[in-house]
Structures are given as structure tokens and as C-alpha cells.
């Protein structure tokens, strides 16, 4: 090799070395956060806005702050189609990515949550199941890696019964009435059934559980039965196209929408707009306000949408499920930030971030500091309660927008916690788990 050629190659190598070192160092200062999403298929109308809100929050943190306490967020989505097997495949593919592995998983599916509940303890990875998943996973001494922040389906069912009792003039007036649950025939849809069965016995009303097969488009026989039985109320526990199909069928059999109450995953814009004026009067639970109501929305507009880099259409920012995805992203980021206060401002392991989840506290001051005042609920998480709060209120669709029509209800934790503890204890016995809080 000619001396000049050798000198040129060595010089290039020396120049490239600092760059390679810089890239490697940067990669080591990244926190990997996976996203299990469904932007295609029957559940896409609901999955897309949630995914957009979550993606926008992480993008905003990177654009505005350079990440979380100086650690860049690397966010990667994996399409599950709401299928449990694909969700597990995504989990296995993403759990080891990044310098410290995945931070936490948000399955956005109760079926996927059930499957990952078996895997997360061995992999030491927290599961954020914001207002879904296993209701008994509020018991942190058994479900040490599950965090159903903001409430469970048992909370939702009990709150809806509180509401119809209040409208009827008290629980005594539920006696002799009839309640039907039209539910997605999946782990998600079945979750409220035990609570509604308990309350039917306690208050003396008839309860009909009416399953709808995936994906929920065909419901004619279900609603013909409702037309025949004429229940006093219908609770809707659907997802994706099932929700709007239920409302359309209610119109077809002339069942009043004012007697229909959806859970909080059956109360978003895609659930009502396909039914047009037929959806007017329909009720659903709410966990947070709708609209661009908080400072974080202004920050997302400024850092992303004003520059043409947002994940959604500008007019979709603030819709129900966009806001829920935004809150989900915030909860992950704040668990990381909480853990950093203990372990340092660096990429953290799932085990360290689990500690952050279990020590989360959103008081008024913290919500104001992160721009979520007026959007997210205050909550305090502990080993004793991985939910942190158990509040919801009722909203009604007026044909154009959702309007809050009740004050917040708190689910009856005296009853529900005892039920969760009984279920969690049985689960621990079945799985050979020795209940106990992880080291603080």
C-alpha cells in the first residue's frame, strides 16, 4: 500500500473514531419505551387516537426537554391488531431493546394484559394498564408488576350502578328492575360481570349478561332480545366498531339511548359519530375531560403541530382517546422521572421503573408543574393500591360533543377491595406466589 494511501485511511479512521464514540455514547443515554398499538383492523377507530396521544407526548418531551431529565426517549410501536398472540409476540420482540431494556409496557388490551401478567414478573417489567386489565391487580402485594392506574372495570360497574340508583331515587328503587350488559365476549367484556351479579343480588334487580362475538359488527339477535325483554337500563362494554354498532342497533329496535350507559372505553367520539343523530342522549363514563383543556395541549401544539410533526390531525388533539393516550404517556414518563430521583438521571431498568410506578404521586402541584391541571386526576400509588384513585363521572353525547352530567363518583372500595383481595389471594395460591411488597 502506498504511504499516502495508508496515511489517508488512518486519518479517516481517526476522524471517524470520535463520531462513532459520540453515537455510541448517545445511544447509551436513551430510554427505550415500547408501544403496543393497533392502527389497523376493527379496533383501529379507537386504537389510533390513543396511539397518537401517547406518541405525541413522548415526541413533545424530546422536542421541548431533550427527553426525561436529559435522557432521550426512544419510542417504537408494534402493531397487535388487538390480538393476544400478536401482543405477546410484540412484547417478546421489544422487551430487550435499548441499553437497559424496555421501560414498561402498556398493552391496551385486557387479553394481552392477562397473558403478560404471567411473563412480567420473570422479566422484571412493569405493566401500565390504565383503567383496564385485571381488577384484582390493585393488590400490589400479589400483582407486583401490574399498575391499573385510575381505576378498574369493577370500579366502573359499581359507579354506573351508583348512578342509575341515584337517578331512580335510591338503591331501594332498583328492586324489581332489569339491567342488561351488552359486552365484548373477551376478558375485557367479562370483567364487570362478577360485580354486577353481586349488586343484582344485593339490590334485587334482574341482571342479563349478553355477549357479543368479536369484532362486534353483528348484534341483531342481541338487540331483538333487548326489544323483547325491554330492560330498564343497558350497560355497554364494547370496543372499536362494536360500540357504534350497538348504538345503531338500539336505534333500530327503538331502545332509548337515554337508558344506555357505556363504560369508559365505550364513550369516545368514534363510538357515537357513526350513528349520527341516533346517538344523541347516550351516556358513558368519563375518566378525564375532553378537549384541549390543559397547558400540555398548548405545548404539544407549539412543539409539534405548529411545525407539522404531530401524529394526529390538528383537530383531533383533545378528543377523548387522544387525551387518554396523552395521560398514558405522561404516567410512564412520570414513573421514570420518579425512579430517577432515586436511581439517577440515566436510562433505567424495568425493575427500577417499577419502583417509580409504585411511588407515583400526582397532587395538584405536580399536575400543574407538568401541565396536566384540568386533564388528569390526582392519584397516589402504593403497594396496597396499584390503582391510585377510583373516580369517574358520567357524560352525555348531545350530537356534537360530550358533556359532563354528574359529579365524580368514587367506587365503593370497602366492597371492591375485599373482593379484589379475595381474588388476588386465590391467584397467589394458584400460582405459588408469596404475597408481599417489594423492597422500598
Image (spheres, helix red, strand yellow):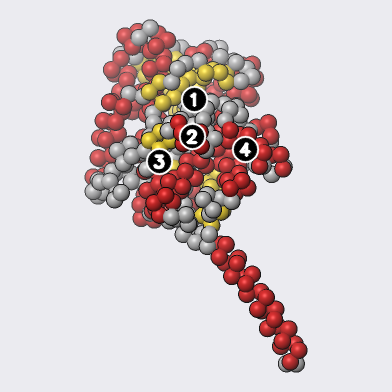
| Residue 217 figure quarter | top right
Q: Residue at x 65, y 78 (%)?
A: 14
Q: Nearer the viewer, mark 1 or mark 3?
A: 3
Mark 3 or mark 2, whichever is nearer to me: 2
Q: Which residue: 72% across, 86% down? A: 7
Task: Please provide percent x and percent y for residue 274.
Answer: 64, 25
Q: Nearer the viewer, residue 271 or 221?
A: 271
**Alpha-carbon distance for marks 4 and 3?**
23 Å
* Mark positioned earlier in the residue sequence (4 or 2): 4
What is the crowding at mark 3: few (fewer than 14 residues within 10 Å), some, or many (at least 20)? many
Measure the C-alpha gap from mark 1 to mark 3: 22 Å
- Report the disc number at residue 286: 1
Name the N-terminal-most of marks 2 and 1: 1
Q: Give the image location of residue 224, x and y in percent.
A: 51, 18
Say which of 217 and 123 sits in front.
123
CA gap, disc 2 and disc 1: 19 Å
Q: Which mark is residue 299?
A: 4
Q: Which mark is nearer the camera, 4 or 1?
A: 4
| Secondary structure beneath label 1 | strand
At x 49% / y 25%, what residue is drawn? 286
- Could you give the CA–CA distance between mark 4 and mark 1, rounded to whole angstroms? 24 Å
Residue that mark 3 sits on: 360
User: Which mark is first along the chain, 2 or 3?
Assistant: 3
Mark 2 surroundings within 10 Å by alpha-carbon count, few (fewer than 14), some (14 through 19), many (20 or more): some
Residue 352 seen by the camera: yes
Amino acid at each position: 500500500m502506498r504511504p499516502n494511501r495508508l496515511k489517508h485511511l488512518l486519518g479517516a479512521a481517526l476522524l471517524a473514531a470520535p463520531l462513532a464514540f459520540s453515537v455510541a455514547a448517545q445511544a447509551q443515554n436513551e430510554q427505550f419505551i415500547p408501544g403496543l398499538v393497533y392502527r389497523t383492523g376493527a379496533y383501529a377507530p379507537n386504537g389510533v387516537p390513543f396511539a397518537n396521544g401517547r406518541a405525541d407526548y413522548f415526541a413533545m418531551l424530546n422536542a421541548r426537554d431533550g427527553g426525561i431529565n436529559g435522557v432521550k426517549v426512544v419510542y417504537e410501536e408494534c402493531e397487535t391488531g388487538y390480538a393476544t398472540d400478536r401482543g405477546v409476540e410484540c412484547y417478546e420482540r421489544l422487551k430487550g431493546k435499548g441499553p437497559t431494556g424496555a421501560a414498561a409496557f402498556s398493552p391496551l388490551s385486557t387479553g394481552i394484559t392477562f397473558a403478560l401478567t404471567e411473563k412480567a414478573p420473570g422479566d422484571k417489567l412493569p405493566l401500565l394498564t390504565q383503567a383496564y386489565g385485571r381488577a384484582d391487580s390493585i393488590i400490589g402485594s400479589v400483582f407486583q408488576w401490574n399498575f391499573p392506574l385510575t381505576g378498574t372495570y369493577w370500579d366502573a360497574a359499581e359507579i354506573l350502578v351508583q348512578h342509575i340508583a341515584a337517578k331512580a331515587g335510591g338503591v331501594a328503587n332498583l328492586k324489581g328492575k332489569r339491567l342488561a350488559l351488552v359486552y365484548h365476549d373477551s376478558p375485557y367484556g367479562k370483567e364487570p360481570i362478577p360485580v354486577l351479579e353481586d349488586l343484582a343480588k344485593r339490590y334485587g334487580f334482574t341482571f342479563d349478561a349478553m355477549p357479543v362475538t368479536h369484532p362486534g359488527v353483528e348484534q341483531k339477535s342481541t338487540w331483538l332480545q333487548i326489544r323483547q325483554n325491554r330492560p330498564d337500563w343497558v350497560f355497554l362494554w364494547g370496543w372499536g366498531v362494536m360500540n357504534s354498532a350497538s348504538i345503531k342497533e338500539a336505534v333500530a329496535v327503538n331502545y332509548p339511548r337515554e337508558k344506555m350507559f357505556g363504560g369508559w372505553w365505550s364513550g369516545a367520539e368514534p363510538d357515537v359519530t357513526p350513528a349520527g343523530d341516533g346517538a344523541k342522549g347516550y351516556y358513558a363514563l368519563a375518566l378525564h375531560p375532553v378537549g384541549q383543556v390543559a397547558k400540555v395541549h398548548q405545548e404539544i401544539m407549539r412543539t409539534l403541530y405548529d411545525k407539522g410533526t404531530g401524529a394526529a390531525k390538528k383537530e383531533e388533539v383533545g378528543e377523548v382517546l387522544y387525551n387518554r393516550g396523552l395521560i398514558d404517556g405522561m404516567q410512564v414518563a412520570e414513573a421514570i422521572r420518579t425512579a430517577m430521583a432515586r436511581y439517577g438521571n440515566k436510562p433505567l431498568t424495568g425493575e427500577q421503573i417499577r419502583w417509580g410506578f409504585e411511588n407515583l404521586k400526582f397532587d395538584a402541584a405536580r399536575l400543574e408543574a407538568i401541565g396536566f391541571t384540568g386533564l388528569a386526576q390526582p392519584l397516589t400509588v402504593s403497594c396496597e393500591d396499584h390503582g391510585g384513585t377510583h373516580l369517574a363521572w358520567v357524560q352525555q353525547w348531545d350530537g356534537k360533543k360530550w358533556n359532563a352530567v354528574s359529579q365524580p363518583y368514587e367506587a365503593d372500595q370497602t366492597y371492591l377491595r375485599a373482593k379484589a383481595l379475595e381474588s388476588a389471594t386465590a391467584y397467589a395460591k394458584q400460582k405459588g406466589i408469596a404475597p408481599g411488597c417489594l423492597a422500598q
